[in-house]
């Protein structure tokens, strides 16, 4: 009979509150898979069971399938639905806790062959769902969020034939009017540039491991409901780059 393995779990978004901290230790029974880890977490933290049922697992910058095997000593990130904090320095091209630098993004995408430039900026707004907002706190799982943003940039360039796409997201506590994200797209013609920028934004909101904790004027706060991260065992949920029809606006991640 196989012995349990000890796993360190990093908790993000609302899971950090419901599981009692940013990092917890769990003993995972055989078969020592990602699914078994989530089962163990739900048994240990029943208040988090509903959220854990919609949570993905990641090791480094890779999402794990339910049947992927874990090893003793692994550090596994639990990725609840994203609503897109602090980040590690290796992710700074895409995530930063400093004020976003639009001029740097413009310089990074400079291309004299392009006749169209589209810049989108998302800002913290005063009200959400009828409640007065005081500030937002953005947190991110840096390795996975940075890799996903890089993927979205590459997908956007390929799908729409644009010359450049750059995305950068801010983390940490932001006040009203602060810019939380910039998307910069350059293309030969305007139609492709507009479509590409819209696509990049919607993909960011649906896929990137960023969470938004909203602070209200009455002193309360709440994590916003987000979109469940597509898991490797559900490939149909990760083929969004093949369709341009998914352009319905939804506010699950940015005040835009």
Image (tube, rainbow, N blue to C red):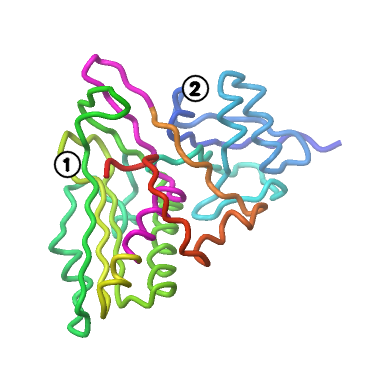
Residue positioned 44% across, 23% down in the render: 17
The range drawn in magenta is: 196-222
- The image shows residue 253 at horizontal and vertical percentages of 36, 41
Question: First in sequence: mark 1 or mark 2?
Answer: 2
From the viewer's perspective, is residue 113 above or below residue 153? below
Tell me how far mark 1 sits from mark 2, CA to CA: 29 Å
Place residue 104 in its image quadrant.
Answer: bottom left
- Nearer to me, 236 or 98: 236
- Indicate the secondary structure of the residue bearing disc 1: loop
Answer few, some or many: residues within 10 Å of disc 1's Cα (few below 14, many 20 plus, some between 14 and 19): some
For label 2, the residue is 18
- Nearer to me, 182 or 144: 182
- The image shows residue 48 at horizontal and vertical percentages of 56, 24
For label 1, the residue is 178
- Nearer to me, 72 or 168: 168
Residue positioned 26% across, 78% down in the render: 189
Q: Are marks 1 and 2 in contact (CB under 8 Å)?
A: no
Q: Quadrant of the C terminus?
A: top left
Is 216 one of the magenta-colored residues?
Answer: yes
From the viewer's perspective, is residue 193 above or below residue 240? below
- Decide if residue 180 is on the left or right side of residue 235: left
């Amino acid at each position: 009979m196989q012995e349990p393995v000890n796993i360190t779990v990093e908790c993000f978004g609302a899971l950090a509150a419901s599981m009692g901290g940013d990092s917890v230790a769990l003993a995972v029974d055989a078969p020592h898979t990602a699914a078994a880890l989530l089962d163990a977490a739900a048994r240990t933290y029943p208040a988090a069971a509903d959220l854990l049922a919609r949570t993905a697992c990641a090791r480094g910058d890779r999402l794990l399938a339910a049947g992927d095997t874990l090893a003793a000593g692994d550090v596994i990130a639990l990725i609840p639905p994203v609503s897109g904090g602090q980040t590690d320095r290796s992710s700074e091209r895409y995530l930063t806790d400093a004020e976003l630098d639009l001029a740097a993004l413009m310089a990074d995408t400079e291309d004299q062959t392009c006749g169209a430039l589209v810049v989108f900026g998302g800002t913290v707004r005063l009200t959400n769902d009828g409640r007065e907002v005081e500030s937002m706190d953005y947190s991110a799982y840096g390795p996975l969020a940075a890799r996903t943003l890089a993927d979205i940039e590459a997908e956007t360039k390929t799908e729409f034939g644009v010359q450049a796409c750059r995305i950068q997201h801010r983390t940490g506590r932001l006040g009203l009017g602060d810019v939380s994200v910039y998307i910069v797209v350059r293309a030969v013609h305007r139609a492709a540039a507009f479509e590409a920028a819209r696509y990049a934004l919607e993909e960011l909101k649906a896929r990137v491991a960023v969470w938004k904790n909203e602070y209200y004027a009455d002193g309360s706060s709440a994590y916003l409901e987000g979109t469940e991260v597509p898991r490797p065992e559900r490939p149909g949920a990760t083929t969004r780059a093949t369709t341009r029809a998914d352009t319905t606006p939804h506010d699950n991640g940015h005040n835009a």
